[in-house]
Image (cartoon, rainbow, N blue to C red):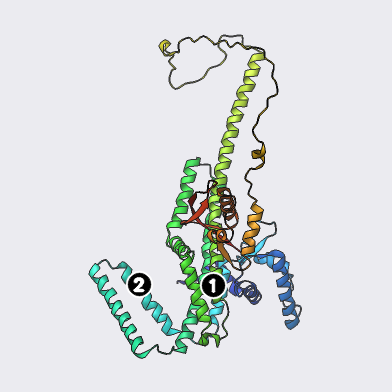
């Protein structure tokens, strides 16, 4: 925290430059309304321009026409400038219209401003409990002495048995309204910070993707050395504390039992009288869907790295094949030239070799006379067959559009659905071919969790029952 470091930080860090900008109230107020408050990620350019024009119109009616003289499109173009780092402008996988999203620096600035607001009360007890639980978990997970671990578990067992006895004797004690509200606000604050952290995680993956593209475009190393360098960088990100933490988070969130438990707890909490009196923001009630959406964005960015490597390998193979074809063409042209103008000398070409070529007489194959095949002239007549031609018109055809319509209809009443749930509503009619079509749709438009396996029963044409083991396939709205 020296003066020179802080001076340079104020001049270069996008978060501090945003807070010091003259238009900071406009930027932070508008971006909070359209991105943070509704927990919105990507917004199309035309939609965001319309929202910004409406926001500017309201400000000019209150403070005069000279307060912010530029148009919404001009402000968006300035905010998306990479040197300012306020908004990220990108093109989605589908569509040719750009979209905008907050950068981690802007999200931190908004979060810092929100921290300046006067809170209803500060939850000191719940924070202390969280600290104690974290420290206790660190000790339990790092303890290597079995006797110490067993002693701690016995202590916890005695506390639980004592609480059970108290409930049986005295009943359930009334809840402390203050503690309930304090814990609710603490959980809501941690959930908002968790979603904000996803932008930083996604930003780190995008940085790795950009560096990989630049390395591929500018490197003149052999293909093997370049791939070793790229995969080494990916392993560093994946094996880092942040990478392992995100992988653990995603596995925990994708567990159906955890999702069901989280949903039931949220529904029960929002039914409590102490919580309903607060008229809470429904943000925490929908946190499961927000986490799934944010995690999916991170996974898509990570998948772009794999796609970039695949394209690089395809391009390299195409270039190598093209070079081989060019060499063959050169040889053919020289052969044609020599054919039309034979050389006058006995030696007209030479090939430099590292070592001489030895042709041993005994290594040659023995002479084999060619076989003479006698052909007889016969008349070809039209044949006839008693076989039915109906089998040619009874081929199995799976209509993917029909399966996609079926999935979209089921997603109208829920946010996600798994492949076994779809098959329970609509059993397979075309056997294994229809199952493959479902998996193909899931790979392109859904989520595939290769860490989890599912067994799906199918019926073969002869009536026998089989089970197919597949990765978990989820379709999301």
Residue 60 relative to residue 299: left or right: right
Q: Position of residue 83 (x, y in %)?
A: 61, 62
13 or 377: which is nearer to us?
377
Q: Position of residue 108 (x, y in %)?
A: 54, 71
User: Marks 1 and 2: which is nearer the front?
Assistant: 1
Label placed on residue 137: 2
Label placed on residue 287: 1
Quadrant where the C terminus sits is bottom right
Furthest residue to the left?
147
Residue occupying the point 62% across, 71% down: 35
Q: Position of residue 394 (x, y in %)?
A: 65, 43
Distance of mark 1 from mark 2, alpha carbons?
A: 25 Å
In the figure, 197 relative to 369: above or below? below
468 or 88: which is nearer to us?
468
Residue 117 relative to residue 402: left or right: left
Label placed on residue 253: none
Image quarter for residue 427? bottom right
């Amino acid at each position: 925290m020296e003066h020179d470091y802080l001076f340079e930080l104020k001049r270069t860090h996008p978060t501090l430059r945003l807070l010091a900008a003259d238009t900071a109230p406009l930027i932070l107020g508008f971006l909070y309304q359209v991105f943070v408050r509704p927990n919105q990620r990507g917004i199309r350019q035309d939609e965001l321009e319309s929202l910004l024009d409406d926001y500017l119109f309201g400000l000019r009616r209150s403070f005069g026409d000279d307060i912010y003289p530029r148009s919404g499109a001009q402000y968006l173009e300035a905010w998306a400038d990479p040197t300012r780092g306020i908004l990220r402008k990108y093109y989605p996988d589908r569509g040719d219209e750009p979209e905008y999203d907050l950068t981690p620096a802007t999200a931190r600035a908004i979060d810092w401003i929100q921290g300046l607001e006067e809170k209803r009360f500060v939850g000191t007890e719940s924070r202390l409990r969280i600290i104690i639980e974290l420290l206790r978990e660190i000790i339990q997970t790092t303890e290597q002495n079995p006797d110490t671990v067993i002693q701690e578990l016995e202590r916890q067992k005695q506390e639980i048995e004592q609480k059970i006895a108290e409930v049986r004797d005295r009943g359930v004690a009334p809840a402390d309204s203050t503690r309930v509200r304090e814990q609710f606000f603490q959980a809501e604050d941690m959930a908002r910070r968790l979603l904000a952290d996803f932008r930083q995680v996604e930003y780190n993956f995008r940085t790795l993707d950009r560096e990989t593209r630049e390395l591929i475009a500018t490197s003149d190393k052999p293909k093997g050395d370049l791939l070793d360098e790229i995969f080494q960088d990916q392993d560093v990100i994946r094996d880092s504390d942040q990478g392992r933490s995100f992988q653990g988070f995603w596995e925990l969130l994708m567990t159906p039992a955890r999702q069901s438990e989280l949903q039931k707890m949220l529904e029960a909490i929002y039914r409590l009288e102490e919580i309903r009196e607060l008229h809470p923001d429904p943000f925490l009630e929908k946190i499961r869907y927000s986490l799934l959406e944010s995690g999916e964005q991170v996974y898509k960015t990570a998948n772009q790295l794999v796609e970039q490597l695949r394209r690089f390998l395809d391009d390299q193979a195409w270039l190598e094949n093209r070079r081989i074809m060019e060499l063959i063409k050169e040889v053919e042209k020289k052969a044609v030239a020599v054919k039309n103008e034979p050389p006058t000398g006995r030696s007209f070409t030479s090939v430099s070799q590292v070592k001489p070529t030895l042709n041993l007489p005994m290594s040659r194959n023995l002479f084999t006379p060619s076989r003479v095949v006698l052909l007889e002239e016969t008349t070809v007549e039209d044949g006839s067959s008693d076989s039915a031609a109906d089998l040619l018109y009874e081929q199995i055809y799976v209509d993917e559009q029909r399966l996609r319509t079926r999935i979209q209809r089921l997603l109208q009443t829920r946010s996600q659905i798994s492949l076994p749930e779809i098959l329970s509503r609509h059993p397979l009619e075309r056997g294994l071919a229809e199952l493959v079509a479902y998996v193909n749709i899931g790979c392109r438009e859904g989520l595939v969790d290769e860490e989890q396996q599912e067994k799906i029963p199918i019926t073969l044409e002869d009536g026998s029952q089989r089970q197919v083991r597949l990765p978990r396939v989820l379709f999301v709205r």
